[in-house]
Amino acid sequence: MKPPPFRVVSCAEKVCYTSSLDEVTFAIVHGQTIMKTLLVALATLATVECFLEIHELSEMVTNANDRWQLRMLEHDRDAPRNEIQKKVAEIVSTQPQDVQTVYKKLVESDNAKEEAEYEAKLIILKNRGEPQSKLDFVKQVHEIEMDMSLSRRQEEQKIKELKWQMGGNHHHHGFDKSWEN
């Protein structure tokens, strides 16, 4: 059996796939307002294949059973993300070449955006003189998000625990209310 073409590397409301562990450095933005001065120029292209909502893939498939399976996976909050990835990869591998090609392009595009946003957050926090503890928090959240052995529910719980350990004064990605101003 050949290995799946993609592997889940991060997930919250999105599932992410990559062909290499070493290439992934990103985090998911969960409704956080990005500083207005963050320029589009920060969003550089990356070679890593990443973020794509399962929903988008389900819209591209024509087989009703595949679509149903993808939608079930999209809402599964308890299965380890690497198990979800295996199932999605199996479905992707059975799709026509055009679906696989477009899927790969969407994944690459999403990854480039998410990677740039994560890196920009770290730069902005450093430039604003935020304490090292806040930078460490953002990095630790990122590491939790990267742990594909966790389910979405476990990921959220670990992030909540980390937030509590850090004194509860950090938002999901390490930004307090001053970030939103």
Image (tube, rainbow, N blue to C red):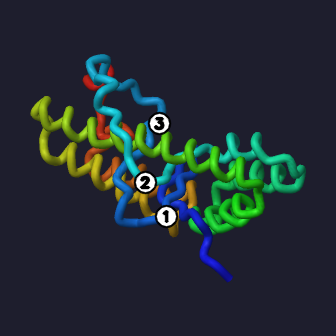
Q: Position of residue 173 (x, y in %)?
A: 35, 41
Q: Which residue bears the numbered disc 2?
A: 48
Above or below — where is 176 with respect to 22? above
Alpha carbons under labels 1 and 3: distance apart: 24 Å
| Residue sitting at x 34%, y 49% | 164
Amino acid residing under circle 3: His
Q: Secondary structure at mark 1?
A: loop
Outermost residue, left direction?
129
Q: Position of residue 8 (x, y in %)?
A: 54, 61
Quarter holding the N terminus is bottom right
Q: Which residue bears the numbered disc 1?
A: 19
Above or below — where is 83 with respect to 159? below
User: 145 or 114, which is in the foreground?
Assistant: 114
Q: Which residue bears the numbered disc 3?
A: 30
| Mark with earlier residue (2, 3) | 3
**Which quarter of the figure has residue 178?**
top left
- Binning the other alpha carbons within 10 Å of mark 2 as few (below 14), some (14 to 19) or many (20 upward) gives many
Amino acid residing under circle 1: Ser
